[in-house]
Image: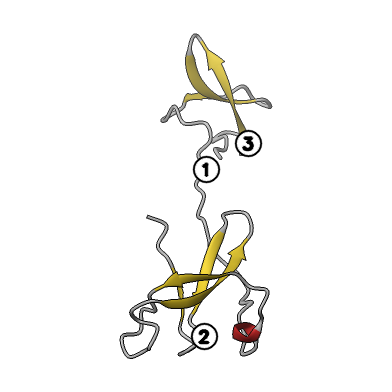
Amino acid sequence: MEFCTVCENMLFLTNVEEKLRFQCKKCGFEKDATSNVVCSLSFQKKEQHTSVIHKYTKLDPTLPRMKLKCPLETCKNHEEGDIIQVRYNETELSYAYLCPECDTIWKMDKN
């Protein structure tokens, strides 16, 4: 946002002869715009979810189970076992996995 050096009012962008210029609507002061960027937006994505996994999750027979390896090397499901799959993000269909033997919880990389 730019302000007039004469009357200190806000300057407005105008297009004069294919050039961007700032112009004061009160006193008529004009100056060239230093950049061609009119508006710049930047977005940061935050991943946030509430945990739906608690101590009784592994006892729920309605949750889908799949054959996966538990990442904990000392677990008996490390070779391959029934792992519980829990969806924690509805819009991106992101899943968390729970090993019912050792209670290890992990997410797969999106890559």
Q: Nearer the viewer, mark 2 or mark 3?
A: 2
Instruction: From the image, tell me which residue sits under label 1.
Output: 41
Instruction: From the image, tell me which residue sits under label 3.
Output: 10
Position of residue 53 measured from the top left corner of the image (x, y, whole percent): 60, 80
Q: Is residue 18 above or below residue 36?
A: above
| Residue at the (57%, 38%) spot, across then down | 3
Q: Which circle's residue, 2 or 3, is located before the other in the chain?
A: 3
Location of the N terminus (image quadrant): top right
| Residue at the (53%, 65%) spot, across then down | 95
Answer few, some or many: residues within 10 Å of disc 3's Cα (few below 14, many 20 plus, some between 14 and 19).
some
Q: Secondary structure at mark 3?
A: loop
Answer few, some or many: residues within 10 Å of disc 1's Cα (few below 14, many 20 plus, some between 14 and 19).
few
Closer-to-camera residue (98/20): 98
Position of residue 105 measured from the top left corner of the image (x, y, whole percent): 48, 80
Q: Picture quarter containing residue 88?
A: bottom right
Q: Secondary structure at mark 1?
A: loop
Q: Is residue 73 above or below residue 30?
A: below
Q: Picture quarter containing residue 90?
A: bottom right
Q: Are marks 2 and 3 in contact (CB under 8 Å)?
A: no
| Residue at the (49%, 47%) spot, across then down | 42
Q: Which circle's residue, 2 or 1, is located before the other in the chain?
A: 1
Q: Secondary structure at mark 2?
A: loop
Residue type at the position of mark 3: Met
Q: Nearer the viewer, mark 3 or mark 1?
A: 1
Position of residue 87 measured from the top left corner of the image (x, y, whole percent): 59, 66
Instruction: From the image, tell me which residue sits under label 2.
Output: 100
Residue type at the position of mark 1: Leu
Figure coloring: secondary structure
